Image: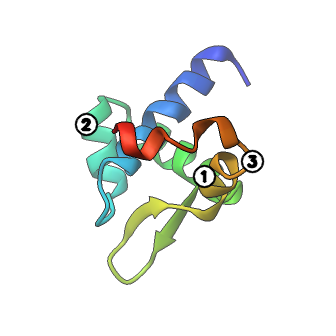
Amino acid sequence: MSVKSVHKALQVLEAVAKEPGGITVREVSERLNFPYATAHRLLQTLKKAGYVEYESTEKVYRIGPQLINLYRPAPHLADLGRLA
């Protein structure tokens, strides 16, 4: 995976995180100005890794449990929630 791909994946993850109610592939595509296929592929990759979840009823992606696991082992970030 190239650095450019990693950057795009992080942009997608940030777009999903900004929408607590979920976001569709089309919304990600339009918001980030990515081709639909690119947005879909990146969301599927993030889903396989557990960073996003897909809600089939509403057809939206939401933040997944793996993102929480990244935060948990970082005790030096414990006060981060209070700063935001």
Q: Which mark is residue 28?
A: none
Seen at 68% across and 52% down, the residue is 72
Amino acid type of the residue that numbered disc 3 sits on in the rendered structure: Pro
Residue 73: give its label.
3
Would residue 2 be found to the left or right of residue 84 on screen? Answer: right
The dot on residue 67 is: 1
Residue 21 image-quadrant placement: bottom left
Residues at marks 1 and 2 touching, judged by CB atoms closer than 8 Å? no
Q: Is residue 77 above or below residue 66?
A: above
Please identify the quarter of the rendering in which residue 3 is found.
top right
> What residue lies at 43% left-to-right and 62% top-to-bottom?
62
Q: Confirm or deny contact between disc 2 and disc 3 (CB under 8 A).
A: no
How far, Cα to Cα, is label 1 from label 2? 21 Å
Picture coordinates of residue 26, whole percent (x, y): 30, 51
- Of pointers 1 and 2, the one earlier in the residue sequence: 2
Q: Which residue is mark 2?
A: 31
Q: Residues within 10 Å of mark 3 (few under 14, many from 20)?
A: few
Q: Nearer the viewer, mark 1 or mark 3?
A: 3
Q: For numbered disc 3, what is the local secondary structure?
A: loop
Q: Amino acid at mark 1?
A: Leu
Q: CA distance from mark 2 to mark 3?
A: 31 Å
Of circles 1 and 2, the one toward us is: 1
Pick the front one: 70 or 74: 74
Nearest to the observer: residue 30 or residue 20: 20
